[in-house]
């Protein structure tokens, strides 16, 4: 070897070590040391040298994730140690029995320590590292034989091609779950829809479909990740004697375990963990279908052994299914605050996501036609967390013989006025505005809501009674309600009537921002209302402004400006505003110190967890640019907590204090990204 080529070989080694280190910081520790540009520069340099000197390329080089030509078929891999399955539990009683069986078998009086982890809804995969290099990856298959997916697993960026650190066994088989994060799944399906390609039903199917590609370039283009949860074959090396210790060792070697893994003691510890993860489930960036408990001590695991194909020392505690099958009894149209017609499926009641569901949204007519849902269809319903249940898809094979396509009604089902649908809009609307009782009711519900006029005790049911009974037509009528008038309503006690009148009185002292938000102008959310209030300072200035002036407000585009301008040109709206003012609804003028016309002026934010689309510093900068304040601890003065993935105690505190929590998507919308 010439002096120059040995220098190059040394540089290649250095670059690989540095790139692998940065991969580890980024993917495993979630704490990158260098900006992306520096990382890209290192990879570029390595590619350049390898391009000019192919003799220096090795299979474990970070440039070699996508290698070789597409396969004709998958090879078969015999698992040296079978990949077991897990028994399932659903109720707390099942967990008590599991713990009792374990303690009886062990003759143990004391509480047992369990390693707890989320159970990812993905695909179990085994990977073998020899001398620290990834040599084989296989699916679980039937537990004894799987498919060789080495070429595809190599393309997953969170799977290291070489182990980090030191002390790993000469042969180490690791096992874990390959999954697709929800955001990646949705983006991928969106692209597929745009290109007229097949869409995947859920992230699990998408992960399985992506891993079972004969062409690794396709797998490489899919947003797959992997968490590791255990080991199989181990040769020439020692591992810690507790499962939790093994997970720590895997992490040190660059094999990322779930960040939510924890050790808990006894049944109460397990049930506490279950509830904690169930609360977090809707906010996680990936799907889980339960949690897994494993006896932490490997010695106790060995003493407990196996029954059939499942270990006695582990169990999966499943969450209630988020998807279920049921039948559509009817499809009705609901009219919203802005007249939007939403098709709603009335269902045979079904238990899903922990509650009984009998209605599910179909979003809008385009969505309804895309899914082609019809009365009598058997459908899959999804309810995740507190999200409104929705129809995922129909089962075509179960469609009754005679069924007909649902059509958009020509007239509003509530007031009979014409329904209009602009070509470029997905929604169809009732054209009657506030003359439509449905729109009136929804506008009043919005007007009274907590973040608008905050009229305590004026809930949906009561508003419906008031409108149906002819007591209230517009928001101004609310302030003309008296105890006597209210007392005539069904189920209205004297005390409640007095309380409501008092609450109405209290709500009169408000802020311009809240008042503007309460008016329910189309597309004017809280941030836009704040921006308008800050910019114009006084309502009269906004009412008198022309469209161009309104468009000057940060983040107000031509469409919103048109809605705002149009709203105040409408005589009926101005009359209602005057009547409200005459009833005593009032606010201080907005003082305009520097920056107060920015949309987040006066709002305090706390960020917790990781955002997938931007770094924390960038998010904080954006908040400040828009006039808001980014602080680090949650208090009752915090306006919003932005919860990224793996959000921690700040999220819990926000929930306890009733502070509004935004997920990444809501936050991005708020900051206009
Ligand atoms: N998190 C996790 N998922 N999971 C699945 N751990 C885990 N362990 C498993 C399986 C099938 O099996 C071992 C307990 C044998």
Image (tube, rainbow, N blue to C red):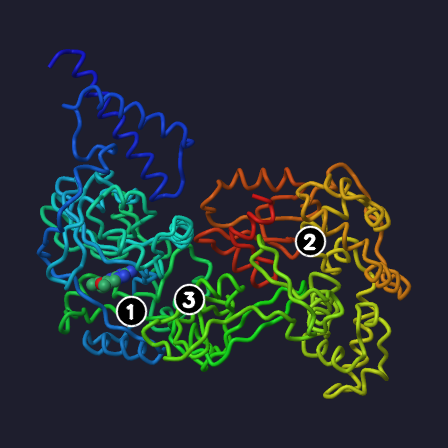
Q: Which of 638 and 79 is in front in this view?
A: 79
Neighbours of disc 3 within 10 Å: few (<14), some (14-19), many (20+): many
Query: Which quadrant of the view contains residue 267?
Result: bottom left
Q: Mark 1 points at which residue?
A: 316
What secondary structure is found at the residue carrying circle 2?
A: loop
Q: Which residue is drawn at 12% across and 46% down?
A: 171
Q: Which mark is residue 272?
A: none
Q: In which quarter of the image is the N terminus?
A: top left
* Circles 3 and 2 in contact, beta carbons < 8 Å: no
Q: Name the residue under label 3.
A: 392
Q: In this view, does 333 lie to the left or right of 354?
A: right
Is 541 placed above or below 19 here? below
Q: Mark 2 points at which residue?
A: 524
Upstream in the sequence, badge 3 or badge 2? 3
What secondary structure is found at the residue carrying circle 3?
A: strand
Is 31 placed above or below 56 here? below
Q: In this view, does 236 lie to the left or right of 449?
A: left
* Circles 1 and 3 in contact, beta carbons < 8 Å: no
Q: How far across and down, in percent of the image, does residue 480 sit?
A: 86, 74
């Amino acid at each position: 070897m010439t002096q120059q080529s040995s220098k190059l070989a040394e540089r290649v080694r250095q670059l690989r070590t540095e790139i692998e280190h940065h991969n580890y910081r980024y993917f495993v520790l979630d704490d990158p040391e260098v900006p992306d540009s520096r990382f890209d520069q290192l990879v570029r340099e390595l590619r350049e040298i390898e391009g000019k000197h192919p003799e220096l390329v090795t299979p474990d080089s970070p440039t070699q994730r996508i290698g070789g030509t597409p396969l004709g078929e998958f090879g078969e891999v015999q698992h040296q140690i079978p990949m077991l399955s897990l028994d399932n539990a659903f109720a707390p009683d099942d967990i008590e029995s599991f713990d009792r069986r374990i303690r009886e078998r062990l003759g143990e009086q004391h509480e047992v320590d369990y390693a707890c982890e989320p159970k990812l809804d993905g695909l179990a995969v085994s990977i073998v590292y020899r001398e620290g290099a990834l040599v084989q990856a296989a699916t679980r298959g039937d537990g004894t034989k799987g498919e060789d997916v080495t070429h595809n697993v190599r393309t997953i960026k969170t799977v290291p091609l070489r182990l980090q650190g030191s002390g790993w066994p000469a042969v180490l088989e690791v096992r874990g779950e390959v999954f697709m994060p929800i955001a990646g799944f949705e983006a991928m399906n969106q692209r597929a829809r745009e290109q007229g390609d097949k869409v995947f039903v859920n992230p699990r199917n998408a992960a399985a479909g992506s891993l079972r590609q004969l062409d690794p370039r396709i797998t490489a283009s899919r947003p797959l990740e992997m968490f590791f949860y255990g080991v199989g074959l181990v040769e020439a090396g020692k591992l810690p004697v507790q499962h939790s210790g093994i997970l720590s060792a895997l992490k040190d070697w660059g094999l990322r375990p779930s960040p939510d893994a924890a050790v808990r003691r006894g049944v109460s510890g397990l049930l506490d963990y279950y509830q904690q993860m169930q609360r977090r489930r809707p906010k996680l960036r990936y799907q889980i279908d339960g949690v897994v408990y494993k006896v932490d001590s490997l010695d106790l695991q060995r003493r407990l052994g196996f029954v059939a194909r499942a270990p006695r020392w582990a169990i999966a505690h499943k969450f209630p299914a988020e998807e279920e099958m049921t039948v559509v009894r009817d499809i009705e149209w609901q009219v919203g605050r802005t007249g939007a017609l939403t098709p709603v499926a009335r269902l045979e009641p079904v238990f899903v996501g922990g509650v009984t569901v009998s209605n599910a949204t179909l979003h809008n007519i385009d969505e309804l036609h895309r899914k082609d849902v019809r009365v009598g269809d058997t459908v899959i319903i999804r309810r995740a967390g507190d999200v409104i249940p929705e129809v995922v898809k129909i089962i075509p094979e179960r469609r009754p013989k005679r069924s007909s396509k649902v059509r958009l009604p020509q007239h509003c089902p509530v007031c009979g006025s014409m329904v209009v649908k602009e070509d470029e809009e997905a929604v169809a609307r009732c054209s009657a505005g506030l003359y439509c009782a449905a729109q009136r009711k929804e506008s009043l519900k919005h007007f009274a809501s907590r973040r608008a006029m905050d009229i305590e005790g004026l809930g949906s049911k009561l508003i419906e009674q008031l409108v149906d009974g002819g007591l209230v037509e517009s928001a101004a009528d609310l302030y003309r309600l008296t105890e006597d008038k209210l007392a005539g309503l069904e189920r209205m006690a004297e005390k409640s009537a007095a309380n409501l009148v008092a609450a109405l009185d209290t709500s009169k002292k408000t802020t311009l921002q809240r008042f503007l938000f309460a008016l329910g102008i189309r597309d004017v959310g809280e941030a836009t209302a704040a921006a308008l209030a800050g910019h114009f300072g006084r309502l009269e200035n906004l009412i008198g402004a022309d469209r161009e002036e309104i468009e000057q407000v940060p983040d107000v585009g031509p469409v919103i400006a048109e809605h705002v301008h149009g709203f105040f040109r409408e005589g009926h709206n101005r009359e209602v505003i005057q009547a409200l003012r005459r009833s005593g609804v009032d606010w201080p003028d907005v003082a305009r110190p520097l920056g107060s016309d920015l949309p987040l002026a006066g709002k305090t934010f706390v960020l917790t967890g990781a955002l997938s689309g931007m770094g924390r510093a960038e998010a904080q900068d954006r908040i400040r640019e828009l006039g808001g304040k980014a602080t680090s601890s949650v208090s009752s003065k915090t306006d919003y907590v932005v919860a990224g993935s793996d959000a921690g105690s700040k999220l819990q505190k926000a929930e306890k204090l009733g502070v509004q929590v935004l997920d990444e998507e809501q936050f991005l919308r708020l900051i206009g990204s």
